[in-house]
Every structure is written in structure tokens, then in C-alpha cells.
Image: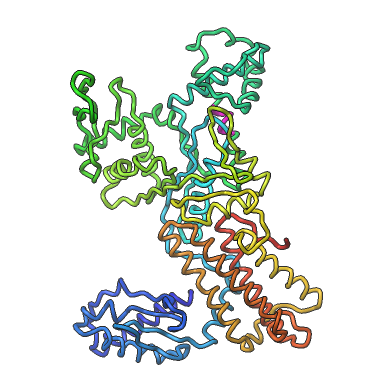
Amino acid sequence: MTIYSRFAAHVDSALDALVAAGELPAQTVRAGVTVEPPRDAAHGDLATNAAMVLARQAKTNPRALAVQIAAELEKIEEVKAAEIAGPGFINLRLSDSCWIAGLAEIARLGPDYGRSDMGAGRTVNVEYVSANPTGPMHMGHVRGAVVGDALASLLEFAGHKVVREYYINDAGGQVDTLARSAHLRYREALGEDIGAIPEGLYPGDYLVPTGVRLAEKFGDAYKDANESEWLVLFREEAVNDMMDMIRADLALLGIVHDEFASEAQLHVEGKAEAAEAELRSRDLVYDGILEAPKGKTLNDWEPVELPLFRSTKFGDDQDRPIRKSDGKWTYFGADLAYHFQKLQNADELIDIWGADHAGTVKRIKAAVAALAGEDAKFDVKLVQMVKLLRDGEPIKMSKRSGTFVTLKEVVDEVGKDAVRFTMLTRKADAQMEFDFAKVVEASRDNPVFYVQYAHARIQSMLRKAAADGITPSDTHLDTLGAEEIALIQQAAQFPRIVESAAQSREPHRIAFYLNDLSAAFHGFYNLGNDRPEKRILMADNAEMTAARLFLAQNIGQTIANGLAIMGVEAANEM
């Protein structure tokens, strides 16, 4: 139990006492009551809005109710004072022993400190990356991959059961282009001079190994064959190779998916037809004619009857076709079927999409609401592209031209941890620059270095102390002063940050918090530069040294727990 949940229980008990005394109605709804840090630390350690939320139900004014609640809270031994502020907020000042007990709780829980059961075991399907299987991972994919993976870890830490899923778009025209590109490389492997790669095919050298493998497997059987004889086969072979490459690339970032869902397989299994039938049974799909596109007239546009999804019923600006005039599924129709499949095995869906997909959010949310009901839990997180800089110049990326910076190249140059942490230093929908020089810079301005250095510094102190025969101890924690208590208070925020980040689906909050905690630790450590009595390791005071080491050890544990959520190593030395 965290200090916030513990004091939420104390507030609840105080309200129970007022109900028993007839000061509050027994049926009072307490759902909006919170216990949080005050906006200004000078106002106290914790604040509750209980009086503000409940005054109307109690038919009294907030300050009058606050007086009664504060009187109950002051009976708690750990509360030094309960002060009323503004129109009725209650600020609590806690005893040092309360915070020291919180430090002991970190030590007791260790790697589980901050873990929550707020998810109650609900299954959340998080779909992320889902790049077209036409080449290796490049920097255009990395941010969504990291955000999705960190969000999945965050939700697991907060008590959800998480399914990490990758949707393979292997049924569109791009995979036919891939097959033709692979066939060209296949002919090259058989000794043909293919010359320049024709316009419209993928020119990257990453397809050369696929061509060699196909030549070894099939010989010259398809060298001069008609496209109809090899297109489907080469498409499957090439997609399999690309997915093997993609899995290997993602593994460099520590990313492993639980499920890989194939669009082509969806169609083979009739999932789109099943979704259409389900929606038709509820009159949510009908046969109709779309309005003419803006600027079109009957002379250059032919009205065609199509199966339309009633997305306007769910807030969209027009109904959407799920099939084309030739009977093939639209992208939206395929997406609808895919989400229909995911809903069979999850309580909640989260999609991580690039910002260029913003226009489709409303319609896919409408589809999920139609399939699962208005209360369906579904969220789309949009991730902005990353502007990649080298020598101050932006690098242009194009998979078709073959001039793109791969994930592997970036990880090889700066390391997995620098990539992952940097991708979480901004809110996902905010613009970002990735500067190769800055992400490896050993300075305060580089949050990757700053946080890892805090953990490494703590581990270095612990090793030095151990060599001198000194171990961390909680025996004399009562010797800790105001600076140490302030650091404990910062560490006590972690469980609350985890829950708020999980609730908002924003893993970047963990990175922000770790930067603040590391700054607080570095500041505490640096006090000893000018004030010898504030040093953590003091040869003439074994009791204080052991107590401060215990504090430092558990600050390190908190940092390590946060980094684990982000998928970043807690460095032991730097």
C-alpha cells in the first residue's frame, strides 16, 4: 500500500466517522475524493479535496465540512497538522516517521515497488509497429515501436494482462510489388544482368539475400515463367523473409510481440465476411450509394451501390464503404474485420499509429463501438514522426529509393538504451528530433545519461562501501534530516506516477519522473561537495553512512524499476 492509498483510506475512515456522527449522509457518493501532492510543496505533504467534493451532498459549505474532516485527520499519529486552504482544500503535514516507513516499503517490495493491481487482470491488446512487410525497420518505425512496447510494459506493471500484437499488412498491392522486386533479385541470383531497378519496384539491397535463397530453393523454374505462376508464391516467400528481418530488427530494441496477425489470413478465414454479417444483422451495414466526391459531376463520376457502414451513427462525418465496386475489401473493411477479431480475446484495444493515420481514427473508433457496444474500451495513440539529424542536416528516408536509415544502424551507433529512452522524452504526439551527438552526450542536458548515471553513481557508492565493510542499514533511519526526507518524498511519488501514466496511456510520464528523481538525487549527492557532514559516505559516522546508503540504495531501486518499464538497462557503471 502506497502512502497515497494509505491516506486515502484514512480520509475514508474520517468520512465514516462523520457519517456515524450524523454529520454526513450515509449515502454520500465519494467517487471524486482524491489524495494527491499539493500543487505547491510549501503547502504541505498531501492534499485532499474531500470537503470540496462532498459539501453539496452534505448540504453545507466546503470550509465548514473541511473543519470537521481535518479534526478527524489530526487524530492520526502520522499527521502533524491538517490545514484548510482556499475554499476548502485540506493540506496535511506528515511526520518524518511516516516517510521513513515509506522508504522501508521500497526496500520490502524491491523490484515490485510501484507495481499496481489497478488493471485487475483485464486483457489489453496493444497493437504497435505493424509496418508493411516490405523491408527492414527504419527510423520512421522506431518511435511507435518504443512507445507501444513501453506502454505494454507499463500496463503489465499496473496489473493488466497484455497482448503485444503486430498486424501484418500482407494483402495489399505493396506486397505484390515486393514479390516482383524479389523475382527480379531471384533472376539476378541466377546470373542475369538486371541493370537498374525499374521504377516502382523496391531497389534496396536487403532483397538480395531473398533472391539468392529463392534461386537455391527453386533453381530456374520461375526465371522465365509468367507472373501468374510465381506471384503468389514469391509474395509469401518474400513476406516471410521480411518478417524474419523485422523480428530481428525489433529484437535489437528488446521488442518481442506475442501475436502476429496476418491480413491475408483474415480474408482466407472469412473474418471480414463475418464482421459484415454481424453488422448487417444490426442494420449497421447497408447497401447504398455514396455522395459524389467534392468537385465531381455525373459526367465524370458514376454512382455505384456499395456496402456502407453507418459510421455517421457513431460520430463520423459520412458512412464508409467496406468493399470496393469490384467486391474487394477496402482498407477500412479489412481493418474492421481485424478489430472484430481482436475483440474476441481482449477487454480493451489500443492501437499505436503514425500521425499520418489521424484521418481514420474516427471511423475505426466508430467500427469498434458498433462491434463491441458504446462502452467499448478502445484507444488510438498517434505518434509523430522523428526528425533524424546527422551533422545538423535532416536525413530523408524513402523505402522505395533504398535511401533510409535502418533501426539496426541507429542501435549499432548509439545503443538500444539511448534510442528507447530518447523516444520517451516527449509526449507521443509531440514533434521530436533525434540528434546522434546529443543522445550519447555525457551531460545534464541528456536525460538518458543523467538518469543512468544516477543509478550507476549509487551502485558505485555501494561497491565502495562494501569494500570498506559498510552495508546499508535501516537501523538508524531516525538520523535522516530534511534533505533526506525530501528525497524519500520524491521516491514515494513513483507508484502514483505509474498508475496515472497507465490510466492516461502515457509511458513518457515515467521518463519525466525518472529525470526529476535523478535530479533530486544528484542534488542531494552534491550537497557533500561543500558540506562534508552531508556526504553519503562518512568515515567518522558509520551509523549515518549506513542510513544514507540505505536511502541511496532504494532510490536506485526506484530508478531501476522505472527504467525496466521503459525497457532501458539500469547501468551499474559508466
Between 437 and 572, which is closer to the camera in this rendering? 437
What's the colour scheme?
A: rainbow
Between 173 and 100, which is closer to the camera in this rendering? 173
Number of marks in the image?
Answer: 0
Q: Is 431 drawn above or below residue 574 in the view shown?
A: above
Residue 287 visible in the current orientation: no
Instruction: Give the percent coordinates (x, y) of residue 29.
Output: 26, 74
Q: Is 158 drawn above or below residue 100 in the view shown?
A: above
The residue lying at 52 percent from left, 74 percent from top is 492
Residue 299 colored in magenta in the image: no
Farthest-out residue, front: 392
Instruction: Give the percent coordinates (x, y) of residue 531.
Output: 70, 84
Q: Quadrant of residue 466?
A: bottom right
Instruction: Give the percent coordinates (x, y) of residue 177.
Output: 49, 22
Q: Is residue 248 left or right of residue 535?
A: left
Instruction: Give the percent coordinates (x, y) of residue 471.
Output: 73, 78
Residue 338 visible in the current orientation: yes
Magenta segment, prevailing SS (helix, strand or loop): helix
What is the magenta range?
239-244
The residue lying at 20 percent from left, 18 percent from top is 299
Farthest-out residue, right: 468
Q: Is 450 drawn above or below residue 3 in the view shown?
A: above
The residue lying at 62 percent from left, 13 percent from top is 194
Q: Quadrant of residue 280?
A: top left
Q: Quadrant of residue 505?
A: bottom left
Residue 243 colored in magenta in the image: yes
Q: Quadrant of the C terminus?
A: bottom right
The residue lying at 35 percent from left, 85 percent from top is 85
